[in-house]
Amino acid sequence: MGFHDQLSRSWTTANSLLCVGLDPDLERFPKAFGTGHDAVYRFCKEIVDATADLVCAFKPQIAYFASQREEAALERLCNYILDTYPDITLILDAKRGDIGSTAEHYAREAFGRYGAHAVTVNPYLGGDSVAPFFAHGGGVIALCRTSNPGGNDLQSLDTGGQPLYIRVAEMVAGKWSQHGECGLVVGATFPDELRAVRATVGDLPILVPGIGAQGGDPQAAVSAGTTADGRGLMISSSRAIIYASTGNDFAEAARQAALEARLASLPPGW
């Protein structure tokens, strides 16, 4: 099953646009939870189990695992999600982007080792840098208009009457989509830009970070970015959900935060 069909199944099964980001940081774990062997895996697994019926996607951020020498925990976690919750879309947040020979190994990592349905990529190196991802049959989600303030440094530059992020959206929707299944990243902190990207790319799925800790308005994102059928978005929240409590009730608190985020991001009529 391709990325788009998988995501469509996830939206239908969960009746939700919410994506929970998995950004484990041992320093933020509940003290009683501990930081010993298997702590990263156990923490993430409890978050997954507490929120799985409320989400269309999980999005582990690879840097949080790699910096703590926990790639094995990430592999184990991805396998657990795929085996236990097959209706949920698994997005590896890696923001990869390199020449073709290196991209081939990044593609093997994302789709071979971790089994992701899709991976985030940096589009700056152009089409040949993502060709290996398409060759492996996975989805490619390109950075377009990111949620951080510094995104303006390049993404809003005028390129012949259009900002660069619109040129990226056109490239992904027009050229890249001829070779494989694509999506884009547009931050909830920029609803006007999200609306412009949606008008450019048609029904391509858009990953929308920036709600929760970054302050984006989920209803503004829904209004600006959903497709005609009220879908089309993966509205992502990470820290506001997984660190909703620093106590032993962290999993229960994460579920409550996810429930509130899901309700806040429901399109009218759902």
Image (cartoon, rainbow, N blue to C red):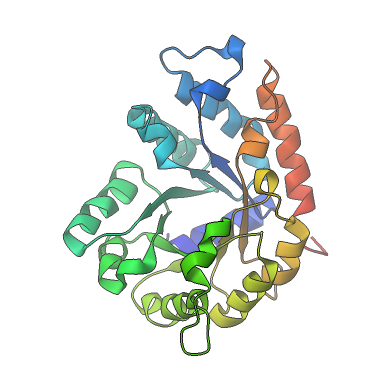
Q: Is residue 184 visible?
A: no
Residue 67 in percent (x, y) is at 37, 32
Give the position of the C terminus as an image quadrant.
bottom right
Name the residue nearer the viewer: 167 or 36.
167
Image-based side of 36 in relation to 55, left or right: left
Image-based side of 75 in relation to 89, left or right: left
Residue 146 in percent (x, y) is at 54, 60
Name the residue nearer the viewer: 218 or 229.
218
Q: How many marks?
A: 0
Q: Residue furthest left?
A: 101
Depicted 240 relative to depicted 167: above or below: above
Q: Residue at x 79, y 51 (%)?
A: 264
Residue 126 in percent (x, y) is at 31, 72
Depicted 148 relative to depicted 52: above or below: below
Give the position of the N terminus as an image quadrant.
bottom left
Residue 125 in percent (x, y) is at 30, 68
Image-based side of 135 in relation to 54, left or right: left
Q: Residue at x 76, y 63 (%)?
A: 220
| Quadrant of the rendered image containing residue 216 | bottom right
Depicted 182 relative to depicted 59: above or below: below
Name the residue nearer the viewer: 125 or 9.
125
| Quadrant of the rendered image containing residue 189 | bottom right
Q: Is residue 42 visible?
A: yes
Q: Residue furthest bottom?
A: 160
Image-based side of 89 in relation to 268, left or right: left
Q: Residue at x 42, y 79 (%)?
A: 171
Q: Residue at x 24, y 58 (%)?
A: 103
